Amino acid sequence: MRVALVTGAARGIGAATVRALCAEGYGVLALDSCAATGAERGAGVGYALATRADLEALAAEYPDRVVVEVADVRDRAALDAAAARAVAHFGRLDVAVAAAAVITGGQPLWETPEAHLRTLWDVDVMGVWNTAAVCVPHFLDGPAPHGCRFVAVASAAGTRGLYHLSGYGAAKHAVVGIVRGLAADLVNTGVTAVAVSPGSTRTAMLAATAALYDLEDIEEFKDSQLNGRLAEPEEVAALVAFCCSERGGVANGAVMSAEGGFRG
């Protein structure tokens, strides 16, 4: 059995990824901060994050394949313990998917509070860095490094600038940089790293983005997609799952588009 650790697992693309991996026979440690409406969401995060009930409901769908961990990706020690728990429970760790992220914004760069930028940096960037830092050693020490995969969920904002989302764009550009640097560091190990870049996807984060733009309906974002519709989390998760597979090694160092022809 291949084993994965997935952050941001309680809902959205993270939860869809857990389901996609379980469908392919993986064991999964599903990790989420479950911060809900608490202050630990971070400065500038004005929408509710997932709850422990969300995470436990996901695990209940796969009682023999999913174990849950409530932890914040900003806490490297907690992530380290989670990765060790995955190995102790399942016997190995083959894949890590860094899907945890938040969004803030709604102002031009020069009016963006530093505290909001810090939230984005700590969660969206350092969370990815921490996930890689604690999981890759288990890959290298495991039974089959050549099949191990690190996948980060980036964004269309990781390769372009978006109106009033300069901080979020900076964070997602950094995620792409982490993946490319990690892929270079992993040369000749067989372990690979890749970023998956969603466009406008039907998630709670997209609803929060609509609020930043004073939009009443997330369907208004479909005009930014060449295919004329929003992506579903399951569609993005299917690409993530491919990148997690042994065949997915061909994407090493790449930014794989799940943007639906996003044009900003």
Image (cartoon, helix red, strand yellow):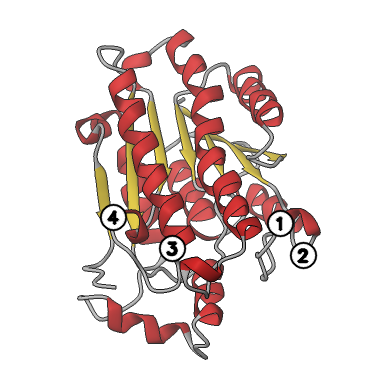
Q: Earlier in the sequence, mark 2 or mark 3?
A: 2
Kindly report the distance in space between the C-alpha atoms of the residues bearing marks 1 and 4: 26 Å
* Residue at image mark 2: 37
* Furthest residue in direction bottom, as rendered: 216
Kindly report the distance in space between the C-alpha atoms of the residues bearing marks 2 and 4: 30 Å
Q: For the residue carrying disc 3, how many other residues have a C-alpha within 10 Å: few (<14), some (14-19), or many (20+)?
A: many
* Residue at image mark 4: 159
Q: Are marks 2 and 1 in contact (CB under 8 Å)?
A: yes
Front label number (2 vs 3): 3
- Secondary structure beneath dot 1 equals helix
The quadrant where residue 181 appears: top left
Kindly report the distance in space between the C-alpha atoms of the residues bearing marks 3 and 4: 12 Å
For residue 28, side relative to residue 40 (left or right): left
- Asked if 108 appears above or below 122 in the picture, the reply is below
Amino acid type at image mark 4: Thr
Kindly report the distance in space between the C-alpha atoms of the residues bearing marks 2 and 1: 7 Å
- Asked if 79 appears above or below 21 in the picture, the reply is above
